[in-house]
Image (cartoon, rainbow, N blue to C red):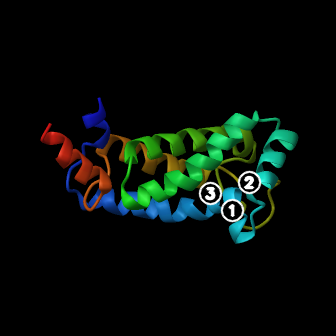
Amino acid sequence: MVKKLFQTDDAWSSLILRVALGVVMFPHGAQKLLGWYGGHGLAGTLGFFTEQMHIPWIIVLLIIIGESFGSVGLIVGLLTRFAAASLAVIMLGAITMVHWPHGFFMNWFGQQAGEGFEYHLLVLGMCLALVVSGAGRWSADGVIAERLRDY
C-alpha cells in the first residue's frame, strides 16, 4: 500500500500538472494560514469559516493544512496522490457549499452575486489526473519509490 502511494512514472505531464497546481494553490493556502496575499491568517480564517459558514473547526483546520502544505507537497512532488486527493475533496466542498448557486462561470464582469465553479472544476480535474498518474518526473515521490523498490 505504501509503495502504491509513492509509485510514479517519469512523465513530464505529471510534473507540469503538479507544479502548476501547486503554484496556483499555494497563495490560497498562504492566505488562510499566514495572512499573506491579503488573507486573514489562521485565526481570521478559522473565525470566518466556523462563525459565518458554520463549518466545524477541525474541518477548517484540515482545509487550511490541505491547501498550505498540500500545495508545497505538489510542487516538490511529495505525497502527490494524497495532496491531490485532499485538494479534490476541498474543491468538491467549495463547489457544493459556496459556488454551485452562482452557476458555472466565474464572475468576470461583476454581475453575479458570487463566483461560479469553473475554477474549482479545473482544479478537481487536475487533482484527479494526479491521483491516477502520480507525481511524475523530478519528484520526491519518485525518489522514495525507487528506495522502496530495494526493500
Report crowding for label 1: few under 14, some 14 to 19, many 20 or more residues within 10 A (C-alpha). Answer: many
Disc 3 to disc 2, C-alpha distance: 10 Å
Question: Could you say whether the residue bearing mark 3 is in a helix, strand or loop?
Answer: helix
Disc 1 to disc 2, C-alpha distance: 6 Å
Write down the residue under mark 2. 42
Write down the residue under mark 3. 29
Report crowding for label 2: few under 14, some 14 to 19, many 20 or more residues within 10 A (C-alpha). Answer: some
Q: Position of residue 3 (x, y in %)?
A: 25, 36
* Residue type at numbered disc 2: Leu
Query: Is residue 101 in sight in this rendering?
Result: yes
Write down the residue under mark 1. 34
Question: Could you say whether the residue bearing mark 2 is in a helix, strand or loop?
Answer: helix
Report crowding for label 3: few under 14, some 14 to 19, many 20 or more residues within 10 A (C-alpha). Answer: many
* Residue type at numbered disc 1: Leu
For the C terminus, the quadrant is top left
Query: Is residue 122 in sight in this rendering?
Result: no
Can you tell which of label 3 and label 2 is closer to the viewer?
2
- Asked if the residue under mark 2 is in contact with the one under mark 1, i.e. CB atoms within 8 Å, the reply is yes
* Residue type at numbered disc 3: Gly
For the N terminus, the quadrant is top left
Horizontally, is 61 left or right of 24 in the view? right
Horizontally, is 65 left or right of 10 in the view? right
N-terminal of the pair, mark 1 or mark 3, is 3
Question: Could you say whether the residue bearing mark 1 is in a helix, strand or loop?
Answer: helix
Q: Position of residue 149 (x, y in %)?
A: 15, 41
Q: Position of residue 148 (x, y in %)?
A: 20, 41
- Residue in the picture at 43% in, 41% down: 82
- Residue in the picture at 64% in, 62% down: 30
Q: Nearer the viewer, residue 151 or 10?
A: 151
Can you tell which of label 1 and label 3 is closer to the viewer?
1
- Residue in the picture at 30% in, 58% down: 139
Q: Residue furthest left?
A: 150
